[in-house]
Image (tube, rainbow, N blue to C red):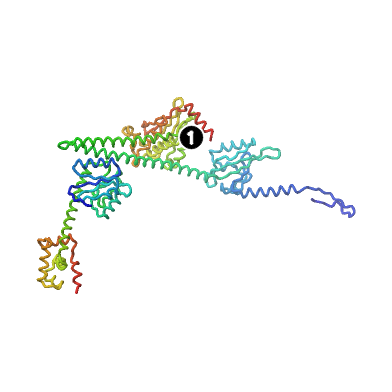
């Protein structure tokens, strides 16, 4: 079950109750919502909230390590940014963590400002990612409303080809291309060719998508 | 049997004869051949000599151990293969032989033809003439250099293992303690920060601040529990109590680090008192203290010129029944600041030091009721001394004596 909520949530996963208690307290004192768990399994068993947020994750979790858990999250399509915390200042481990996309690698006991800054950065990164994802989802909804002809014309228009050439390639009249083109622009909500090209970029649409119908008799 | 016809007269043939029983003589001959075979095929050196040390026989074993051929040695003096510092010992052995004494499995050293020093185990028996007078000696020598070396190597490896084990355990223990204490500390610090924020809020959230403080107290107690558990653990393993001679321990440690000493061009001087009382304590732990102090001294002298490296280890009787050991080096010495922190854990003046050696040594001595201190020398270097008090309490001595009797 996914519950929509815009209030950011920080997920703290650490097997130590003192650490969890202290971090919950600190993060709540700056007005953040906190959910804490003793293990990765506990987190995975819970319903996920559809809200921006980030993880504060102990590197040495019972069972799977924090780094392995980070991989599991990617597989599960959970893209919340991760801030690693560790009792040992293990440099190779921190390098691996940062390379695999972690926001920060902090050593316990945590410096308040470092943690709060990292959490803010994590939440911000997630907010941007979510907005982006939301936009792409909307565009996709619009794109599927296009007829297959309109999608073909769309794919060729964004390459900058003039109508005449598109008409030639698709074996259509120039007039028909013009109609499909304005229909497509209207359905997608694009105000200009540049606007449309940016949408195509976000959707991953390219001229290649116009190819299959070209081979049609 | 030999017979000779006395006359040529055929009828009165007379024989003059001497009948000798040759059986015994032949048996003796066989026996001596057999013995000669044993002697010549033996891997041990079998040598006979006169009482003034002239070599009479020299077997193949002697050749293979000492390198000299029999032809080189027979008629020569046995002193040729004896190291000069052992001349007195050999004279003493010859004296004992004169009195008909036998010397069994005596371990000593000889010099081979190529100048190598060979460790041997010796059995020397007097040779008697038929009147029972001692006329010489036969000696059987076995080369034990290899087994001695193996023994020394084993001892070295054991010590190294003990050292590594000690350092590793210490390192692991430190990491474990650091982790165990770090967790509640993380809690305390986070809750403390939270508490300040609750108080700084407008209006202050006193209820939340109170909960933060409660959490800090719980976490603080938890950290204290960790420390208490470690203390209990340490207390559970009291040091062993052995009775031992401190001088022997000093010599053992010097032997252990002999390679280290020669590698650093240091010839240590040992001034050991003869009247030392028996020490009661954990021999291994005290050995580690001496080892640690000597290794520190070696390191301290690594930066001074080899000609100026002087290391003295001395033992003296301290008070009525105590022992004092002094280790004096001519190294880089100690400055005032180092002196203040010398025995604190994690304090080190070495680039690669952990700063645990002196702290642990201090703890060991305190556990023995003794003390360890350092003073800079007037000229160069530093002097470390430790004193062990008289601890030979009556009941303890009786108990230990009982334990030794059961062995």
Determine the image quadrant of residue A32: top left
- Residue B330 drawn above or below residue A121: above
Where residue B362 appears, x then y in whole percent? Answer: 38, 33
Residue at the image position 60 percent from the left and 43 percent from the top: B140
| Front position in the image: B105 or B220 | B220
B206 relative position to A62: left or right:
left
Where residue A133 appears, x then y in whole percent? Answer: 18, 55
B406 relative position to B308: left or right:
right
Q: How many marks?
A: 1
Kindly identify which residue carries mark 1. Answer: B248
- Residue A212 drawn above or below residue A118: below
Chain on which label 1 sits? B
Secondary element at tag 1: helix
Furthest-right residue in this view: B11
B202 relative position to A83: left or right:
left
Other-residue count near label 1 (Cα within 10 Å), few / some / many at <14 / 14–19 / ≥20: few
Residue at the image position 10 percent from the left and 68 percent from the top: A179
């Amino acid at each position: 079950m996914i519950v929509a909520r815009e209030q950011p949530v920080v997920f703290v996963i650490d097997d130590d109750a003192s650490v969890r208690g202290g971090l919950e307290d600190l993060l709540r004192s700056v007005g953040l919502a906190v959910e804490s768990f003793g293990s990765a399994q506990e987190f995975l068993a819970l319903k996920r909230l559809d809200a921006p947020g980030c993880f504060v994750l102990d590197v040495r979790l019972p069972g799977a390590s924090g780094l392995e858990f980070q991989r599991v999250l990617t597989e599960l399509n959970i893209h919340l940014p991760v801030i690693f915390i560790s009792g040992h200042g293990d440099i190779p481990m921190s390098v691996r963590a940062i390379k695999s996309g972690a926001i920060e690698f902090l050593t316990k006991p945590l410096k308040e400002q470092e943690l709060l800054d990292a959490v803010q950065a994590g939440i911000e990164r997630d907010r941007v990612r979510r907005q982006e994802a939301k936009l792409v989802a909307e565009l996709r909804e619009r794109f599927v409303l296009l007829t297959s002809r309109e999608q073909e014309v769309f794919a060729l228009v964004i390459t900058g080809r003039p109508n005449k050439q598109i008409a030639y390639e698709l074996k259509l009249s120039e007039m028909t291309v013009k109609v499909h083109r304005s229909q497509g622009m209207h359905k997608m909500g694009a105000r200009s060719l540049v606007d449309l090209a940016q949408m195509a970029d976000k959707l991953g649409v390219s001229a290649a998508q116009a190819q299959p119908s070209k081979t049609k008799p | 049997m030999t017979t000779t016809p006395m006359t040529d007269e055929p009828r009165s043939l007379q024989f003059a004869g001497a009948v000798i029983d040759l059986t015994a003589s032949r048996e003796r001959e066989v026996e001596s051949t057999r013995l000669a075979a044993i002697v010549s095929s033996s891997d041990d050196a079998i040598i006979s000599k006169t009482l003034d040390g002239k070599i009479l026989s020299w077997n193949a074993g002697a050749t293979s151990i000492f390198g000299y051929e029999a032809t080189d040695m027979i008629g020569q003096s046995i002193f040729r293969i004896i190291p000069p510092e052992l001349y007195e010992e050999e004279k003493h052995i010859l004296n004992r032989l004169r009195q008909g004494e036998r010397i069994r499995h005596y371990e000593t050293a000889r010099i081979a033809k190529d100048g190598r020093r060979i460790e041997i185990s010796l059995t020397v028996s007097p040779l008697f003439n038929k009147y029972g007078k001692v006329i010489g000696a036969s000696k059987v020598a076995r080369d034990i250099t290899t087994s001695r070396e193996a023994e020394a190597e084993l001892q070295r490896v054991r010590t190294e293992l003990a050292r590594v084990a000690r350092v590793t355990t210490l390192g692991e223990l430190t990491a474990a303690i650091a982790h165990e204490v770090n967790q509640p500390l993380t809690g305390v610090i986070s809750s403390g920060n939270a508490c300040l924020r609750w108080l700084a809020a407008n209006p202050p959230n006193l209820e939340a601040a109170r909960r933060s403080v409660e959490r800090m107290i719980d976490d603080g107690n938890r950290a204290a529990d960790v420390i208490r558990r470690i203390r209990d653990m340490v207390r559970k393993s009291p040091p062993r109590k052995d009775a031992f001679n401190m001088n022997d321990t000093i010599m053992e440690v010097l032997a252990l680090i002999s390679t280290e000493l020669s590698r650093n061009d240091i010839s240590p001087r040992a001034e050991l008192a003869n009247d030392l009382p028996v020490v009661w304590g954990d021999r291994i732990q005290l050995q580690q203290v001496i080892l640690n102090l000597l290794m520190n001294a070696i390191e301290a002298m690594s930066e001074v010129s080899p000609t100026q490296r002087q290391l003295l280890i001395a033992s003296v009787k301290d008070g009525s029944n105590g022992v004092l050991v002094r280790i004096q080096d001519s190294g880089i010495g100690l400055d005032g600041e180092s002196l203040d922190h010398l025995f604190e854990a994690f304090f080190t003046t070495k680039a690669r030091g952990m700063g645990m050696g002196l702290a642990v040594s201090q703890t060991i001595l305190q556990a023995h009721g003794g003390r360890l201190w350092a003073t800079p020398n007037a000229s160069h270097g530093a002097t470390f001394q430790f004193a062990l008090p008289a601890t030979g309490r009556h009941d303890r001595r009786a108990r230990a004596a009982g334990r030794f009797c059961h062995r």
